[in-house]
Amino acid sequence: MLKDTVIKINNFIGGGLVRKFVVWIVVIIMLLGALTTIFVQISLTSTLSEELHERGMAISRNLAASSTEPLLIEDTVSLNRLIGNIKKTEKDVEYIFITDAKGKVLVHTFNAGFPGELLTAHTETSSSSRLLDTGDGYVIDFKAPILNGRAGFVHIGLDETSLNEKITQTSRIIMMLTFIVGALGVFMAYIAGDYLTRPIRALVKGAEEIGRGNLGYQIETESTDEIHILSKAFNQMSHNLNNSINELRTSEERYKKLVDGISDAVILIDSQKNILSWNSAAQEIFDYSFEEVVGKSINMLYSPFKGIVTDNMGEILDGEGVFIKKNGMLFPGVVSSRPLQEGADVGRVVVIRDITHQKEMKKLEKQLLQSDRLATIGQLAAGVAHEINNPLANISLYAQMLLKKTEDENAKSKLKTIDDEANRAAHIVQGLLEFARRSELKLNPIDINIEIDKVLSILNHQFNDIKVTTLLEPLPLIYADSGQIRQVIIDILTNSIQAITKNGEIMIRTTANHDHIEISISDNGYGIPRENMDKIFDPFFTTKEPGEGTGLGLSICYGIINRHNGTIDVRSEVGIGTTFTIKLPV
Amino acid sequence: MYPEKSIILMSMLLLVLTLSGCLNTEEAARVDLSNRTIDAGDNSDTESIRIAVSAIISPEETLVYYQDMLDYISEKTGVPVKLVQRKTYQEVNDLIRRNSVDAAFVCSLAYVEGYDQFGMELLVVPVMRGETYYYSYIIVPKDSDVNNLKELKGKTFAFSDPLSNSGKLSPEYILAQMGENSETFFRLTFFTYSHDKSIEAVAERMVDGAAVDSLVWDYKDTTDPKFTSRTRIINKSRPYGIPPVVVSKDIDPELKERLKTILLQMHEDEKGKEILNNIMIDRFSEANDSLYDSIREMKKVVKDVKGYSN
């Protein structure tokens, strides 16, 4: 209750400590002054009026005593002299009159006639006083009986004005003193308040400094009181804080260096999988600035097509994944994550290792191995082909000669078979020679898109129900052997057509990059089993029945593209389809 | 510091201070002093019987002792009775001479003078302790080494009233017989104008001796020996006629008779008896002027010695 009031008053006062101090001091001084004034006035009033009463009583009783005899012997001259003297010598005497026992006025000090009302104003028969309001002021009428009232009564009227004047004057002095003390109080309270609050202000400044980050700020104090203890505690706290923060900073820096030293992306995420922090390797790998990723979901780093972020339970899956850089480039990576705190879902540390390089190395190695093998096969085949070419030519020649000379139909048909088989063998040998770079490249500037269109127009009636979609970007002209390129496209398309069983779809895309063009041909056929993937470019590898294909088609394609300094790639999944990607340098 | 808030606080304080100045405890009665309606000194009491009492004892004591008796008379006559007092016996005698009072209690010598000068009439005399006589006592302070009047020579002496028998004439007479007179015998004399004051003056050793009425001394010694106990009687005079109640010779005879009857019968009723007892009077009785011849004798002697003229 009181506390509330004080708080209210403090709010009402407003401002700082010094002001509150000053206002309270003044209020207290003024209250004390008022109380003192009231007290003094009350006590002074009672003392003075008591004194006045005593004086009035004394005068009236004395007069009663001394007027007894003159009154009894009807000596009005003496009585008049008596009351006249008293009125002259005694202060504040407004009037004196004496009545006989029956209340008849015998003598009085009024100049002309006696006011009749005064006789009835104070009728008590014992010695007493009565306050009268004369209109001009207050008069106390003191009445003293003469011989117990048997001889008469003395009345003396004492003016209260001088008493009130004294009280008023005293009150005025006290009030003035109160105001002087109040003024002094303001001055001294201001000085004292300023002095007393100086250490508090120093504390406030210190707190502000620390709040601003100026840790270790020290306050200077001179006093020895509680404020000093507080200041010391504050300084200690400031010092400790500074030390702790420095230690923390050192530790943090150390850990940052440690984490930054890791070449893998280390990403800290919260329970909602939002990125809290990451290391500099992560920044390098993904090419985002920290500001761009902080607070965002880690999903943004996963490739939207390939990346599998979480399992059904919403947990991040460890293992391989595909990630996307800021520039849209995808790259393979290995994820491993650990919870920040065991048994509590407060977030995880996710480590992503970019394995692009590893993958490329592996692929290169494979390619190297393949071309090595193919080169060996090629050389062998070329040698064999060269040696076989002449015998085959002789077989075919002699078969034809015999064909012309014989009339025997049975013999004719057998000779024809010999000639056909010889020609087929020669054709295979030709193929081998082509694969073995035996044929020359006829390089001309060509538009691959036009070549694709030509191929499609030739193969048009082979597609039957297969839906062929082309997405051909405008391409720069490249130097290439148009016939051979056409053969490659035909071979791949033929493979696709053969792979498609029903509801076939073939998608042909060309894209131009800054140093190469890309042709990709996708189908939704039955795909290539994983175990065959490494062998599909090998000569004579075929999944067809013997006699249906030579198994040379894709290895010839490989040879052609290779001789154009390009690459040919295949990606395939059983049941989904196969995509061949050809890259040719511009 | 914002001034407006401070002003509110200050004015609250001032209000408190101002209110505190308005404290007054007693309710005053309204009196208009300007309406002067009464003239002072208007002392006419035409309808009342005026009875004077000489200051044998002081006026205060007189009032105390005689008021009851006067009230009694008032009751009996059905007319208000006013007590009239004067400082000296002479003034009372003058009132009687002018017929300003209807009756008076006077000193024996005053009666003698009044009788001789203007025919003051004797109404009744009180009977005290069965006697109609009284004496003059010469008293000194109790521890005084004075044992007779002679030894008071060169001392101070108090008379009561010039017209007092016991307080003036009697001692003068004794001195005259000794061949002295008061003016030369005493170092200093003065009048107290009442016997009780003379007793008090001796008791308080304001004077070395005084002559007092035996009736007063005895009465005081019986009722209130505060002062008498501190005095000692060194001389008792021969008996004198007791101070009487007198009337003017011009009094209405009917009133004179009524007063006389009331006083003479006063001891017969219960209330009257009590009043008389209080002032040690047995009753009132009729008396003859010859009762005071001894005083007339003394007066003559004293007059012869020092030309005493009253």
Image (spheres, coloured by chain):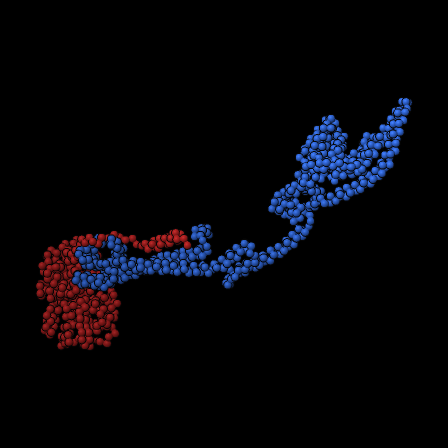
Name the quarter where the N terminus of chain B is drawn: bottom left
| Chain identifier for the blue-coloured part of the image | A
Relative vertical location of residue B198 with respect to residue A272 in this rendering, above or below: below
Q: Which of A64 and A436 is in front in this view?
A: A436
Q: Residue at x 43, y 51 (%)?
A: A12
Q: In this view, does A94 lie to the left or right of A404?
A: left
Q: Which of B112 and A377 is in front in this view?
A: A377
Residue A235, image x and y in percent? 55, 59
Choose top left, top right, bottom left or bottom right for residue B141.
bottom left
Choose top left, top right, bottom left or bottom right for residue B71.
bottom left
Q: Which residue is drawn at 81% across and 34% down?
A: A431
Residue A177, image x and y in percent? 36, 60
Is residue A303 in view?
yes
Q: Nearer the viewer, residue A581 or B142?
A: A581
Choose top left, top right, bottom left or bottom right for residue A137.
bottom left
Colour chosen for chain B: red
Relative vertical location of residue A579 with respect to residue B81 in this rendering, above or below: above
Name the quarter where the C terminus of chain B is drawn: bottom left
Residue B9, image x and y in percent? 39, 53
Q: Is residue A41 left or right of residue B219?
A: right
